[in-house]
Image: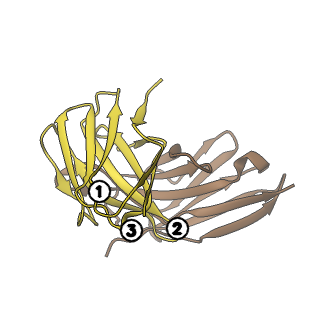
Chain colours: A yellow, B brown
């Protein structure tokens, strides 16, 4: 059974804290993505990676960074969390050429 | 710009058919997708259609693609209460040299009344 696993389902952090969201996939996919999902705004792409150590900015990269040291793992980092980063974060992966995305269960982050 | 548009809400009675519509802008998209998100969960692929097809049927699901109008629809026959979820339309997009990125609509929340 193919899987994308996100390390935390729920997190509560304080403003200014550093936050790590981890994502692991077991399908040997080249591409990995981080989205955030907010009511009325749908899914917005933060960053993606198409190879180890490679990263590309998505539509809303400000306030975030990413790390891809191994093919199966893609981390999203909030260097200094702010309240407007309270959201549901979804990790996904796929492999060319079909583009079918496999999603994790999501990490709901609340920043107080 | 690149936009995938879909209505935000749809309400149907159990046993009726549901039709969720979507318009997209990029005529070069290779694949178009329908994803389903149940409460508290991630997105799961329901079905997809290759851009050179105009219809795909999979059990209770029928996808229609009108490439000229850039219109995609998802029909769910005999809708059940378990079909209540948010349905996302998405188009494939070349992004930074990779064909792997998808552009999503905002999602249509389907409510099924018993």
Q: Secondary structure at mark 2?
A: loop
Categorize mark 3 by other alpha carbons within 10 Å: few (<14), some (14-19), many (20+): some
Question: Which residue, as the protein is rendered here, is positioned at the far left?
Answer: A53
Tag in front: 2 or 1: 1
- Identify the image quadrant of the C terminus of chain A: bottom left
Of A31 and B67, the residue lying toward us: A31
Q: Residue at x 70, y 53 (%)?
A: B84
Mark 2 on the same chain as mark 1:
yes
Q: Secondary structure at mark 1?
A: loop
Q: Chain of mark 2?
A: A
Mark 1 on the same chain as mark 3:
yes
Q: Which residue is mark 2?
A: A39
Coordinates of residue A30 in the picture (x, y in percent):
24, 36
Categorize mark 1 by other alpha carbons within 10 Å: few (<14), some (14-19), many (20+): few
Q: Which residue is mark 1?
A: A17
Q: Residue at x 37, y 64 (%)?
A: A85
In this picture, residue A58 sits left or right of residue A104: left
**Reading the chain from its start, which is encountered first: label 1 or label 3?**
1
In this picture, residue B67 sits left or right of residue A25: right
Q: Which residue is mark 3?
A: A83
In this picture, residue A45 sits left or right of residue B56: left
Q: Chain of mark 3?
A: A
**Reading the chain from its start, which is encountered first: label 2 or label 3?**
2
């Amino acid at each position: 059974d193919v899987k994308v696993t996100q390390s935390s389902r729920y997190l509560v952090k304080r403003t200014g804290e550093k936050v790590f969201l981890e994502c692991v996939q077991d399908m040997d996919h080249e591409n990995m993505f981080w989205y955030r999902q907010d009511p009325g705004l749908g899914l917005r792409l933060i960053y993606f990676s198409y190879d180890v150590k490679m990263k590309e900015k998505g539509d809303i990269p400000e306030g975030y960074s990413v790390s891809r040291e191994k093919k199966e793992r893609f981390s999203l980092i909030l260097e200094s969390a702010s309240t407007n980063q309270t959201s549901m974060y979804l990790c996904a992966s796929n492999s060319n050429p079909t583009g079918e995305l496999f999603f994790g269960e999501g990490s709901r982050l609340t920043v107080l | 710009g690149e936009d995938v548009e879909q209505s935000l809400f749809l309400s149907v009675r159990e046993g009726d058919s549901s039709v969720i519509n979507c318009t997209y802008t990029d005529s070069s998209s290779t694949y178009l997708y329908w994803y389903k998100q149940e409460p508290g969960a991630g997105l799961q692929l329901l079905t997809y259609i290759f851009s050179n097809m105009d219809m795909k049927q999979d059990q209770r699901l029928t996808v229609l693609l009108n490439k000229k109008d850039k219109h995609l629809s998802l029909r769910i026959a005999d809708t059940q209460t378990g079909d209540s979820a948010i349905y996302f339309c998405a188009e494939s997009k070349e992004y930074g040299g990779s064909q792997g990125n998808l552009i999503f609509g905002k999602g249509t929340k389907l409510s099924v009344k018993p």
